[in-house]
Image (cartoon, rainbow, N blue to C red):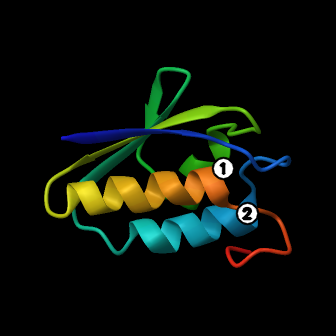
Amino acid sequence: MTERAAIIGNPTGMHARPASKLLAMIKKYKCKLTLEVNNKPTNPRSILNLLSMGIKQGSEVIVKADGDNEGQAADEISEYLVNFRDSGGPDE
C-alpha cells in the first residue's frame, strides 16, 4: 500500500469541474483507491462521493492506493489535489 498526503490549495476547494477531472484520472488506475479527509475514508470512483467529502482549501487529503501501479496512482492523484486551480492554469 502506498499513501500520500495532499493539502488543498485551491481557494474554492473541490467542486464539479476539478472533481470531474480527478475522476477521469482515477479511472485510469486499476488499483484500489481511497481518499480520506478528517479520518473519513471514501471510495473516489464516484463524483458524488468526491463532492460529498467537503474538500475545502487547507483540507488534508490522504490518498491511499493498493495494487497495480499504486505508487504512480498515489503520486499523480496527490499532485493533482495540491495543484488544481479554478482558472488560468493548465489543470483547469
Please name the residue shown 39% across and 40% down the image.
Answer: 4
- Label at residue 3: none
Which residue position is annotated with label 1? 51
State the quadrant of the N terminus: top left
Query: Mark 2 to mark 1: distance in Å?
Result: 7 Å
85 sits left or right of 34 in the view = right
Query: Residue 76: x, y in percent?
Result: 42, 62
Contact flag, marks 2 and 1 (Cβ < 8 Å): yes
Q: Amino acid at mark 2?
A: Ala
Q: Which residue is drawn at the image coordinates 60% and 71% (left, top)?
A: 21
Dot 1 crowding, Cα within 10 Å, few <14, some 14–19, many 20+? some
Is residue 45 visible from the viewing direction of this image? no
Hey, which quadrant is residue 67 in on the image? Answer: bottom left
Expressed as whole percent of the image width and height from the top left, the position of residue 30 reads 23, 66
Q: Is residue 81 above or below residue 40?
A: below
Q: Which residue is mark 2?
A: 16
Q: Is residue 89 in view?
A: yes
